[in-house]
Amino acid sequence: MRIGHVALYCEDLERMRKFFGDYFNARSNDMYRNRRTGLRTYFLSFDGCGTSLELMSRPGMSGGDPSAARIGFTHVSFAVGSRDAVDALTARLAADGYAVADGPRVTGDGYYESCVVGPESILLEITV
């Protein structure tokens, strides 16, 4: 068994698609539109990974603070292969104006990671 995909509602679908393409080398399919509901989606795929990320948007969505502690999914983690890659991507995101919430560091349970606040306040964990 494996996770097929994870979905993320967002306000600015094109900005999010560009972000994941630019920083995580995501490849996007063509936009799907449901004319009845207004739903628009992209599926993003990543090299070496069978799991995809679905970006979704529709009229009338209400936002909250996705970085706040709450019940439910809290972040998406991307394994980039090495400590140097964690450091480099974290530094690139910081240089481009994204807030580094934590790290890079070795966690208490032995992971090397950083946590960056991406567009629309989504939390992204970058690990080895």
Image (spheres, grey):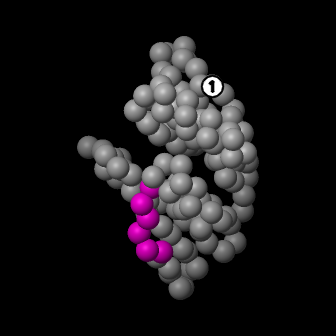
Residue on which the image places disc 1: 103
| Residue 29 drawn at (x, y percent) | 41, 69
Q: Quadrant of the N terminus?
A: top left
State yes or no: residue 107 in magenta. no
| Residue 82 drawn at (x, y percent) | 43, 28
Quick check: 59 left or right of 124?
A: right
| Residue 46 drawn at (x, y percent) | 39, 52
Give the quarter of the image for residue 52. Answer: bottom left
How many numbered marks appear? 1
Q: Residue at x 42, y 60 (%)?
A: 27
Q: Residue at x 50, y 81 (%)?
A: 34
Give the quarter of the image for residue 71. Answer: top right
The region drawn magenta spans: 26-31
Work out whether residue 5 can be spotted. Answer: no
What amino acid does circle 1 point to? Gly
Q: Residue at x 53, y 85 (%)?
A: 35
Relative to 73, residue 103 above or below? above
Q: Residue at x 66, y 74 (%)?
A: 59
Quick check: 122 left or right of 20?
A: right
Work out whether residue 60 can be spotted. Answer: yes
